[in-house]
Every structure is written in structure tokens, then in C-alpha cells.
């Protein structure tokens, strides 16, 4: 196997590694370097300014606002999404009525139908989903307010995305809507691999359904839930929140910066305001937040691994 | 849910066994009752969410057949007649046809490139021992957790300096690069599961490493390639952030970008019905593909997260 081995390895790795280094790794390294300069992005000239950008960042109110919103995204979104998904997945897989002569645990009727339908939003582009909901949220002629009018709630006509105290929650709701289905399917796959004998024993002992959920399903599914939390948090800090906030909310990150998030702020500073160096500084902060988030979740969620 | 718990006998240490025998006959009805209340509740929740998922989509389809005045006047009413002209207007005047073509070109090119380059790298990393193997593997895999936005600013200038800004092939190369982390991660695990004996036999018979890979290993890896291919197809088809930054030429826009631009400029043009038709046009192919390839899509999307 030795003959020509290294030539082969180099030949096969050169193109993928080269492309990856050029377009992913190199820009990452550069951006950390740029955060110590006063580069505008408009001209090739710049000089080193040390920690000036970082000092400026600590006194930037909008940065703190965006950090706060991003953290809210990383904590609330996974909590709501994963809880809903766990509930639905449990009902779909274990929550069925016990039929005489049937298996001990079974899903509700039509469980495969639910799994297919819930997954719909996951295959749609987040950009398209955002556009759709921007229309639905329209205060005058949108679907939601007109539905409220239709059921007699004429005086409940929120401004939704136009209301600074509501806008952020409206945006989050869209992300919940679009991601729950993925986790329902993911958790369903996990629940399917839990042996039925465990449920059987619990049912013989007279355990109720909520007891079986908290004592059997959740502990055995814990690893999946935890990696789901990290995965969702990274998405919520990064790409997904960029699309929803940029497309759905008006002006610079919603009324009075009420929906601005870190990714959006990076984008605006770099490509709208011509402050590339400062943008990369916020980007570095985002990287630190993301890594810290993943580390904390992994650490807090560490449990003894259960074998079954 | 608290109240429904109480009728179920609590697993009290001593009394449990006694009561189980004594109260054996009335127990099934008790559980049935609990099940009944819970089932109404859980079915209700499941149906409610199904409606919440489907309704916005149906609403979009319905709206795409209405004229502008009824879109704003009565958002929930059925269309007075099916305005197919919305769809033809969106396809030609709103350039949806062009955006579709651009998207197909970009995604087609990047998908093939991602699968070829990704499987080459993954094969080498999974099957060969050489110094730096682990380092390169973690370099690739680490890319999955980094915020793309951080790299985006310098990336813009890298792409610009190479003269690849606003070109289809430039976008393809960048898409491939950003798809590699997950693809390499997934396929490395997959190639490890394939038996070594077949490849070794081929090599002993005189086939070169390259030939062994393309004629033996790649066909064997087909299920893995399909899964990761679907994952990348959806991701690349739905990509929004990369084209927004790297592709500002109006003629080269991809679907998501074109639609968002259209919505922004609608404030001046006011062709909302055409925009809705475009929106539905962009949604339907992926929804149809999902319904047809439902199993593979789910397998492809969940496989990575479960590992």
C-alpha cells in the first residue's frame, strides 16, 4: 500500500484543502488581525491601532443591545423550540392510547403524518419564510391582524414588527415555527431506539405518562437534547438570526434598534457604514460568545452517560 | 397535566404491591380516564401545530392567485378568480425565471463540486495514516461551529481581489468551501464504516489508489453521498447570507436574494400579487421534492446531528 501513497494523499487533499483554506480559514485569521487596525474596507490602506476598536466596542450602546438580543436568541429560542419539540415527539411516539393487544408504547394515530407536516418549514429557505411572515405581520392588511378582526378582536391589533417591545418576539416566533419540526424528527429517531421494556416496566409500576417522560425518555435522550441545544444556539447566534432580522424588521434592526443582533451589526458596520475593522471586532466578540455558549452548555449539561 | 396525574397510583414503597392486587379491576378504567383527558389535550396540541405549519403556506398559495386590491382588502378571502397572470408576470417581468436559472447553475455546480471534493478529502482522512491527518480533520470540522459572518468581511475582499465577485463560478467555489466542513465530517465517518478488504483486493490486483477510489469506494459510498447530497442541496438552495454579500449584480441574483430584493423594491412598484406568485414559485419545488424524497431528506438532515 505504500507505493505512491503520499502522492495520492497530496493529490486528493490539495483541491479541497486549498479551497477551504483560501475561502474559510484565511478570512477567519485575517478578520482577527483586522480587528486591531483602522481599516475602512473602502481603501487598501490601514494602520495598526491596538485595542482601540475593542475599547470603542465596550462603549457602544448598540453593541450592548445587539449582544443582549443575541444572548436572548441563544437562550430563549432553544428552550422554547426544544421543549415544544420534545412534547410533540413524545406525543407522536409514546403518547398513543393503549390499544388492547397492541404494543406497550405506541404513537398517536397519524404519527407519520405529523412528522411529515411538521418538517415542511425546515426545507424552506429562511429568507422566504421571513418574507412570508413579514406580510402576515403587517398591521393593516396582514393575515394575523385580519384573523384577529375576523374572530371579533377588533381592538387587539398590535403593530407586531413595528412595536419595539414586540418586534423581537415576533422574529423569534418565526424561528421557532421553522425549526420545531426538525427537532421533532430528530427526537423521534432517538425515542424510537429506547427499548420498549423500559416503558413496560414503568407502566406496570403504575407510572403516569408525565412520569415516564421525565424519568425515562428525557434522561435517555439527554445527549441528543444537549447537542440540539448547542446546534440551535449556534444557528440562533449566526446565520438564521441574520436572515430573519435583516429581512423582517424595518430600518437598522427594527424600531429603535429593538431587534438588532450581533450578526446584523457586523454586516451593517462592514457593508453599509464602511467600518470593516470595527465590524471584524464585533465579529470576534461574536466568535467568543459562540464558543463560550457551546462550552457552557456542554459543561452544565454533562450527565453520566446512560447505556441501554 | 398535574390533575391527571393524581388518579394514577403513586409508586409508594409499601402499599404499592398490596393495592396493585386489591384494586386490580378498577385500575384499567383509571388509566383509561387519564389517557382520555391527555389524549384530547395532546391530539389538540398536535393538530393545532399542524394547522399552524400548514396555514401560512396555504395562505401564501391562495394569495398568489389574488389581485392586489383583495390582498390588502381581505387577506383571508378566497380569490374571486384564479389570477394566473400573477404567475406569468412574476416569471417574466419580475425575473423569477432568471433567478431560477442562476440558482440551478450555482447549486448544480456547487453540489457536484462539494460531493467530489468532499468525498476525496474524507476518503483520504478516513483511510490513510499520515502526519497531520488529525490536524486537517479538525481544521475541517471546526468550521462547523464558527460564525460565518466573522469571515465574511475579509472573504469579500479575497473574492474581490481574485476577480470572482459577482460571478457564478466564484459563488460556486465559495459555496463548496463553506459546505466542506459538514460534508467532510459526515463522509469521513461514513468511509470508516465501509469494509477495507474490497479496496485492498482491488489494490493488490493492480488498480491505482485513484482508480480504487473512483471505481470501487465511491459506488460503495452511494447511500452516504445521497444523504449528504440532500443536506447540501437544501442548504445551498436556501443560502441567503453568502450571495447577499458576494453577489450584488442584479443579473446574477439567486432566488432567495432576488425575492428579498423584489420585496424591498415593491414599495415603489406595488406588484404584491406578482411577488406572492414568485414566493410560492420558490417554495413549491423544494416542498414537492421533500414530499417525494421525504425519507432521504430526513435521514440526511438528522444523521449529522445524531452522530
Image (cartoon, rainbow, N blue to C red):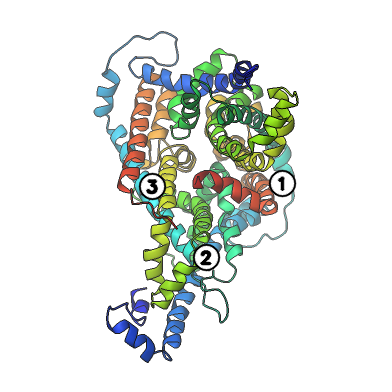
The quadrant where residue A213 appears: bottom left
Mark 2–mark 1 distance (CA, rounded to whole Å):
41 Å
| x 39%, y 32%: residue | A265
At label 2, counting other C-alpha atoms closer than 10 Å, the crowd grade (few under 14, some 14-19, many 20 or more) is many
User: Would residue B102 be visible to someone looking at this image?
Assistant: no
Same chain check for tags 2 and 3: yes
Chain label for disc 2: A
* Along the viewing direction, whichever of A45 and A8 lies nearer the viewer: A8
Element under label 2? helix
What numbered label is drawn on residue B150?
Answer: none
Mark 1 lies on residue: B87
Q: Nearer the viewer, mark 2 or mark 3?
A: 2
Mark 1–mark 3 distance (CA, rounded to whole Å):
33 Å
Residue A136 pos. (x, y %)? 52, 53
Residue A152 pos. (x, y %)? 46, 69
* Along the viewing direction, whichever of A266 and A105 lies nearer the viewer: A105
| x 67%, y 43%: residue | B223
Residue A73 pos. (x, y %)? 37, 45
Q: Is residue A191 above or below residue A276?
A: below
What numbered label is drawn on residue A93?
Answer: 2
The quadrant where residue B114 appears: top right
Amino acid at each position: 500500500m505504500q507505493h505512491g501513497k503520499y502522492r495520492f494523499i497530496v493529490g486528493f487533499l490539495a483541491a479541497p484543502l486549498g479551497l477551504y483554506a483560501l475561502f474559510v480559514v484565511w478570512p477567519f485569521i485575517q478578520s482577527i488581525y483586522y480587528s486591531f487596525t483602522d481599516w475602512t474596507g473602502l481603501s487598501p490602506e490601514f494602520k495598526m491601532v491596538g485595542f482601540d476598536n475593542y475599547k470603542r466596542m465596550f462603549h457602544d450602546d448598540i453593541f450592548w443591545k445587539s449582544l443582549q438580543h443575541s444572548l436572548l436568541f441563544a437562550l430563549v429560542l432553544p428552550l422554547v423550540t426544544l421543549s415544544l419539540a420534545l412534547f410533540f415527539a413524545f406525543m407522536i411516539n409514546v403518547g398513543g392510547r393503549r390499544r388492547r393487544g397492541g404494543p406497550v408504547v405506541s404513537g398517536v394515530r397519524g404519527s407519520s403524518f405529523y412528522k411529515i407536516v411538521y418538517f415542511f418549514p425546515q426545507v424552506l429557505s429562511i429568507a422566504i419564510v421571513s418574507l412570508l411572515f413579514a406580510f402576515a405581520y403587517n398591521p393593516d392588511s396582514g393575515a394575523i391582524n385580519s384573523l384577529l378582526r375576523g374572530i371579533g378582536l377588533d381592538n387587539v391589533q398590535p403593530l407586531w414588527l413595528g412595536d419595539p417591545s414586540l418586534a423581537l418576539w415576533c422574529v423569534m416566533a418565526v424561528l421557532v415555527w421553522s425549526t420545531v419540526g426538525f427537532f421533532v424528527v430528530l427526537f423521534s429517531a432517538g425515542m424510537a431506539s429506547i427499548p420498549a421494556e423500559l416503558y413496560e416496566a414503568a407502566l406496570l409500576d403504575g407510572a403516569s405518562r408525565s412520569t415516564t417522560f421525565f424519568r425515562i425518555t428525557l434522561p435517555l435522550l439527554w445527549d441528543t437534547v444537549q447537542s440540539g441545544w448547542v446546534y440551535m444556539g449556534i444557528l440562533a447566534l449566526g446565520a438564521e438570526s441574520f436572515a430573519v432580522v435583516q429581512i423582517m424588521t424595518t430600518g437598522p434592526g427594527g424600531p429603535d434598534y429593538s431587534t438588532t443582533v450581533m450578526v446584523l451589526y457586523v454586516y451593517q458596520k462592514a457593508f453599509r457604514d464602511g467600518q470593516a475593522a470595527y465590524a471584524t471586532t464585533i465579529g470576534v466578540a461574536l466568535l467568543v460568545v459562540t464558543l463560550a455558549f457551546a462550552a457552557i452548555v456542554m459543561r452544565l449539561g454533562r450527565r453520566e452517560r446512560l447505556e441501554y | 397535566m398535574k390533575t391527571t396525574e393524581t388518579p394514577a397510583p403513586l409508586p409508594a414503597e409499601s402499599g404499592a404491591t398490596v393495592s396493585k392486587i386489591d384494586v386490580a379491576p378498577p385500575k384499567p378504567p383509571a388509566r383509561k380516564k387519564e389517557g382520555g383527558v391527555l389524549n384530547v389535550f395532546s391530539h389538540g396540541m398536535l393538530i393545532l401545530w399542524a394547522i399552524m405549519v400548514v396555514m401560512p403556506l396555504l395562505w401564501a398559495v391562495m394569495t398568489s392567485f389574488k389581485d392586489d386590491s383583495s390582498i390588502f382588502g381581505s387577506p383571508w378571502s378566497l380569490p374571486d378568480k384564479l389570477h394566473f397572470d400573477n404567475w406569468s408576470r412574476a416569471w417574466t417581468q419580475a425575473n423569477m425565471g432568471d433567478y431560477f436559472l442562476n440558482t440551478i447553475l450555482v447549486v448544480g455546480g456547487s453540489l457536484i463540486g462539494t460531493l467530489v471534493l468532499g468525498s476525496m478529502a474524507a476518503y483520504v482522512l478516513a483511510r490513510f495514516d499520515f502526519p497531520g491527518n488529525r490536524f486537517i480533520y479538525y481544521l475541517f470540522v471546526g468550521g462547523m461551529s464558527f460564525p460565518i459572518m466573522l469571515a465574511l468581511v475579509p472573504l469579500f475582499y479575497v473574492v474581490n481581489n481574485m476577480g470572482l465577485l459577482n460571478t457564478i463560478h466564484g459563488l460556486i467555489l465559495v459555496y463548496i468551501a463553506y459546505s466542506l466542513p459538514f460534508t467532510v465530517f459526515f463522509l469521513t465517518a461514513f468511509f470508516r464504516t465501509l469494509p477495507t478488504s474490497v479496496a485492498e483486493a482491488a489494490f493488490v490486483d493492480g488498480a491505482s489508489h485513484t482508480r480504487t477510489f473512483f471505481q470501487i469506494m465511491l459506488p460503495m459510498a452511494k447511500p452516504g453521498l445521497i444523504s449528504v447530497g440532500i443536506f447540501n442541496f437544501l442548504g445551498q438552495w436556501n443560502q441567503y447570507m453568502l450571495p447577499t454579500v458576494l453577489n450584488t449584480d442584479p443579473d446574477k441574483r439567486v432566488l432567495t436574494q432576488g425575492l428579498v430584493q423584489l420585496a424591498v423594491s415593491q414599495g415603489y412598484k406595488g406588484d404584491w400579487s406578482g411577488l406572492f406568485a414568485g414566493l410560492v414559485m420558490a417554495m413549491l419545488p423544494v416542498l414537492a421534492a421533500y414530499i417525494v424524497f421525504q425519507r432521504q431528506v430526513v435521514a440526511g438532515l438528522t444523521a449529522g446531528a445524531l452522530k
